[in-house]
Structure formats: structure tokens, C-alpha cells
């Protein structure tokens, strides 16, 4: 069994045209040791990013044809994220294409199309600063303020866990133009240059080998034309973007879990105990079957969430998938480490890195418990 011959729910021609060459490219250029070197160096590799854009067409696959994309959508994003999950890719696809580009489509300015084109070409990267330490996972909690000043705004506040901010050329900041910290109204989006005066960036690594930053905004001046969407009415845009990003990491989780299954099956066939491969022990076979079942169920839920992104059931479907897939990530990754024994937590072994990414996904954009609560709340509201 390999990651390419399971969980195929009838990919479209475009999905296959993107995923198959991407998989071959990553197998050749993004093996485990190459990734470890990237993590150790904490280095951004623009050449690889441009290859993903030009030679492979990955960055423009889900962008409109009018800006140089291929006109795809959530299905193509899912195929790409699954492939990235199988190789633990660190490049800022999620933040730039899934999150950043989704918000930029709402920017009613003549500069929007050129920036989206630059993303498709691999010439621009974007980070989205939406979370705050006191707000938990709630997108409506925003204490960062934007105060009108002349023909623009002054931004003050602190954003946390801004993924890939160190490699971003642009940062989209969520700030409040009216109301109190937890109000649904009064939230706006601002497009900033990453090097704008008044931005202090505190960079750090995440447990899965990625990078994030805290941003301290001190009287950051932004022109009024750099507001994305209607002033004070950005929450629906943010919620839609977060649901799309959550669906994307659910697809990535499927790639991560399939890799964990493949690595574990291969290891148990090689590891010998009492004169035979441990894969022959029935109790371990049962554990690996449980892992496979979890991975396949997760793939089904990820597909349902993707299909329902453009329906009124979007939020409930996404939360249902994320809650269950988060628990599957924990179950599959823990079983993989246990079946490897002590070496399962060693940095030199791939399984430990997949384990960390699985745990990160379980928390990203809302934990399993958060999304279960959200799902229940949405069900009550629709009754």
C-alpha cells in the first residue's frame, strides 16, 4: 500500500494533472533529510517557491484565469495539500494562496489583480495576522485597533501566531475600526507591506518545524485604499477564509496520516522480534488496521467539508470534519510512535516529525473540542 493507491475519490483531470507531477517533484527534491536541513537553517527558498509556481503550476491552480491562474478551486487545493502533507512541506502555500488570496479577492482596488498574479507567478507571499492571545480561536475577538487618521488609519495592537510572517512580503491584518473586543461588527482588514514602519516582528519556530511570529503594531500607518472589503464588515470574509483554511489542513492531515500508516507498515515489516517481523503479530496488525480505518474515515470527512464549502452548511460541515480529523490525527500519530518504540520520538526518524505535524494540525484553526462545540452551537441555531 502506498499513499497514491488509497483514498482516491475520483480525482478530476486537473487534480491529477497537478497532484501527480507535484508528488514526483517532492519525492525527488523534498525528502526527509532535505526537509530537516530546511528546518535547521530556518531558511526561505525562493527558487523552490518559483518552481512550484512556474514549472508545476501549483500556486495558480486554484486562482482565477483572469489573474494567470488555472481556474480551479477547493478540489485542487485539497489535492495539493494532501501531497504537501505526505512530505511535510514547509513552504507558505496555506498562508499565501488559501488564506491571503481568498481575502485579496475582496479587495476592490486596481492593485488587487496584479498582486494575485504575482502570487500565481511565485513573486509574492502573504501572511494573515488574525489571531490574538486573549481571543482563543474566536475570529470575532479583535482588540487591535485601527483609528482613522487623515486619508487612512493608524494601527496599534499585537497579533500572535502569524504563520510564515518572516517570509511574507505582505501582511493582511485584522483590526477593529469600531466596537468592543468581542463584537461581531466593527472588524476590518488592512493590507500592509511587511516592512512597513511601526511593525515589530518576533519570530519563532513551531513544534512541527514551521515558523510563526508575533507582531507588535505601533502607529502603523495604512492608506484608506488598502482596506480589504467594507470597513467594519469583515467578519464574514474572515470566517469564510478560516473555513477554507481549515478544510485545507484537513486535506493535509489526510496526507500526514497516510504517510504515518505507510512508514509504520514498512517499519513493522523490517523490525524483527522473537525471530520474525513484528508485522506478523496479530495484535500489531489490529493496531495498524485501526490506523488505516482512521485515515480513510478522515479522507471521507475532508471530502464532505470540501464539497460543502459553497453551501449554507459550510460551517457545520467544516467543524464536523475538523473535530473528527483532529482526533484521528492524534490517534494515528500516537499509534505510529508506539509501534516504532523508543525511536519513534527521535528527531532522526521521520515518524517523530509527522507526529509533531499531526498534533499541530489538531490545534490549528481550532481544536477538536472547539469545533465540536461550534458544530453543536450551529446545529442548535438551525433548529
Image: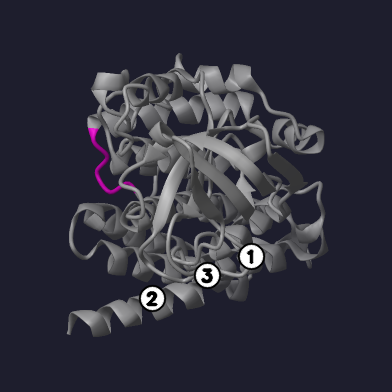
- Which mark, residue 374? 2
Whether 348 is among the magenta residues is no
Q: Is residue 163 above or below residue 133?
A: above
Q: Is residue 263 visible?
A: no
- Which mark, residue 133? 1
Q: Is residue 20 above or below residue 274?
A: above
Label 3: how many residues lie within 10 Å, few (<14), some (14-19) or many (20+)?
many
- The local secondary structure at tag 2 comes to helix
Q: Position of residue 279 (x, y in %)?
A: 63, 62
Which residue is rendered at x = 27% and y = 32% of the image? 72
Q: Which residue is mark 3?
A: 367
The disc, 2 or 3, on the residue closer to the chain's N-terminal end is: 3
Label 1: how many residues lie within 10 Å, few (<14), some (14-19) or many (20+)?
few
Which quarter of the rendering shows the C terminus? bottom left
Q: Nearer the viewer, residue 327 or 121?
A: 121
Which residue is rendered at x = 65% and y = 29% of the image? 195
- Which mark, residue 120? none
Q: Is residue 126 visible?
A: yes
Quick check: marks 2 and 1 in contact, CB under 8 Å?
Answer: no
Q: Position of residue 362 (x, y in %)?
A: 55, 64
The disc, 1 or 3, on the residue closer to the chain's N-terminal end is: 1
How many badges with numbers are in the image?
3
**Mark 2 or 3, closer to the camera:** 2
Q: Which residues are magenta?
A: 8-12
Quick check: marks 2 and 3 in contact, CB under 8 Å?
Answer: no
Q: Position of residue 91 (x, y in %)?
A: 59, 34
Amino acid at each position: 500500500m502506498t499513499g497514491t493507491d488509497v483514498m482516491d475519490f475520483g480525482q478530476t483531470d486537473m487534480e491529477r494533472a497537478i497532484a501527480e507531477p507535484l508528488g514526483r517533484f517532492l519525492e525527488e527534491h523534498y525528502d526527509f533529510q532535505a526537509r530537516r536541513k530546511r528546518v535547521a537553517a530556518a531558511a526561505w527558498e525562493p527558487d523552490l517557491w518559483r518552481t512550484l509556481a512556474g514549472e508545476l503550476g501549483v500556486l495558480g491552480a486554484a486562482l482565477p484565469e483572469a489573474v494567470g491562474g488555472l481556474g480551479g478551486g477547493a478540489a485542487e487545493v485539497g489535492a495539493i495539500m494532501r501531497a504537501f502533507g505526505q512530505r511535510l512541506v514547509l513552504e507558505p502555500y496555506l498562508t499565501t494562496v488559501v488564506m491571503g488570496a481568498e481575502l485579496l479577492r475582496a479587495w476592490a482596488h486596481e492593485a488587487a489583480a496584479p498582486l494575485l498574479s504575482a502570487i500565481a507567478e511565485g513573486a509574492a507571499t502573504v501572511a494573515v495576522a488574525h489571531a490574538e492571545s486573549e481571543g482563543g480561536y474566536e475570529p470575532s475577538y479583535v482588540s487591535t485597533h485601527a483609528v482613522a487618521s487623515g486619508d487612512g488609519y493608524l494601527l496599534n495592537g499585537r497579533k500572535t501566531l502569524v504563520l510564515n510572517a518572516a517570509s511574507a512580503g505582505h501582511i493582511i491584518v485584522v483590526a477593529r475600526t469600531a466596537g468592543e473586543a468581542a463584537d461581531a461588527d466593527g472588524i476590518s482588514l488592512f493590507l500592509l507591506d511587511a516592512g512597513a514602519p511601526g511593525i515589530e516582528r518576533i519570530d519563532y519556530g513551531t513544534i512541527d518545524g514551521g515558523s510563526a511570529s508575533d507582531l507588535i503594531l505601533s502607529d502603523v500607518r495604512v492608506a484608506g485604499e488598502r482596506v480589504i472589503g467594507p470597513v467594519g464588515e469583515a467578519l464574514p470574509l474572515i470566517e469564510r477564509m478560516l473555513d477554507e483554511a481549515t478544510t485545507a489542513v484537513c486535506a493535509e492531515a489526510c496526507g500526514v496520516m497516510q504517510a504515518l500508516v505507510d512508514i509504520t507498515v514498512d517499519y513493522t515489516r523490517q523490525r524483527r522480534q522473537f525471530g520474525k517481523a513484528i508485522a506478523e503479530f496479530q495484535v500489531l496488525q489490529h493496531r495498524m488496521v485501526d490506523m488505516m480505518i482512521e485515515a480513510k474515515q478522515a479522507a471521507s470527512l475532508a471530502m464532505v467539508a470540501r464539497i460543502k464549502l459553497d453551501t449554507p452548511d459550510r460551517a457545520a460541515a467544516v467543524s464536523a470534519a475538523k473535530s473528527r480529523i483532529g482526533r484521528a490525527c492524534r490517534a494515528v500519530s500516537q499509534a505510529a510512535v508506539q509501534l516504532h518504540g523508543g525511536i519513534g520520538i527521535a528527531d532522526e526518524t521521520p515518524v517523530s516529525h509527522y507526529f509533531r505535524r499531526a498534533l499541530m494540525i489538531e490545534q490549528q484553526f481550532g481544536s477538536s473540542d472547539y469545533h465540536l462545540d461550534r458544530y453543536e452551537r450551529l446545529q442548535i441555531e438551525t433548529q
